[in-house]
Image (cartoon, rainbow, N blue to C red):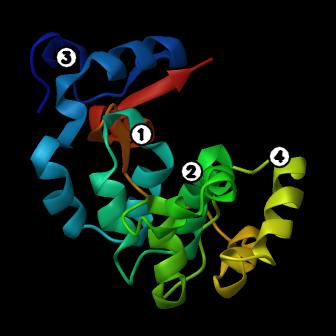
Amino acid sequence: MATGIFAGLFGKRPTQMTSGEAQMLYSGDPDIVVAAGADVVPWLAQQGPDVWHAVATTWNYGYGVEGLRWILSQDQCDKGTSTHVFLVEGMGHWLWDVRQKQETFENKSHLCRIVLDNWSTYRSGDLRPTITAHANQLDTARKLADAPPFDTTPLAEILRYEGSRDAVSAYDSMDGQIVQSFDGWLAHKNIELTS
């Protein structure tokens, strides 16, 4: 049910507006938030791999990573989700930190280490990561995969992973919260975009 300024805008007939107008309303609509803070992990526990993927691939790491740790610790986590997180964190800094300081590898609570440790337990490998690594970074990472401590890990397989489909989800994440996706919000508010 629409509230506040939204109540008068949304009736039974589709409301037409430009994408820019809709984005402004979407970003200011308090009804888009479905879980925040301590409610994120319990909410995730009620969802499945496609939603987890959408949340993980839109997550702002500046708001903490407990939800991501939880997702990556599930057997039902898709390899595409774990690959996405690994590419963000691993290519961002973790692989290079391990190369400089081996003790970094021993931190089993780091997202990249969780992916390496759980890779063989993930039951599906359908979803595409939504990020790609730079070719030079991938070449360097592939060389690392053949050397200790990575030579006994699935790093090479993770770097080759591609996936075959996009996630289907009515949810995303924004600023550490779970939110309705923009498309889901448009449908819920009965909005049609005009050009």
Image-based side of 177 in relation to 120, left or right: left
- Would you say the residues marked 1 and 2 are in contact, meaning their CB atoms lie under 8 Å apart? yes
- Disc 2 marks which residue? 89
- In space, the residues marked 1 and 4 are separated at their CA atoms by 20 Å
The residue type indicated by label 4 comes to His
- In space, the residues marked 3 and 2 are separated at their CA atoms by 38 Å
Sequence-first tag of 1 and 4: 1
The residue type indicated by label 1 comes to Tyr
Residue 164 versus residue 99 in the image, above or below? below
Labels 3, 2: front one: 2
Q: Residue 134 carries which label?
A: 4
Sequence-first tag of 3 and 2: 3
Where in the figure is residue 187, as x and y percent of width and height? 36, 40
Q: Residue 6 carries which label?
A: 3
Q: Nearer the viewer, residue 132 or 3?
A: 132
Tag 1: Cα neighbours inside 10 Å, few (<14), some, or many (≥20)?
Answer: some
The residue type indicated by label 3 comes to Phe
Sequence-first tag of 2 and 4: 2
User: SS at mark 2?
Assistant: helix
For image coordinates 14% across by 61% down, the residue present is: 42
User: SS at mark 3?
Assistant: helix
Sequence-first tag of 3 and 1: 3
- Disc 1 marks which residue? 61
- In space, the residues marked 2 and 4 are separated at their CA atoms by 14 Å
Sequence-first tag of 3 and 4: 3
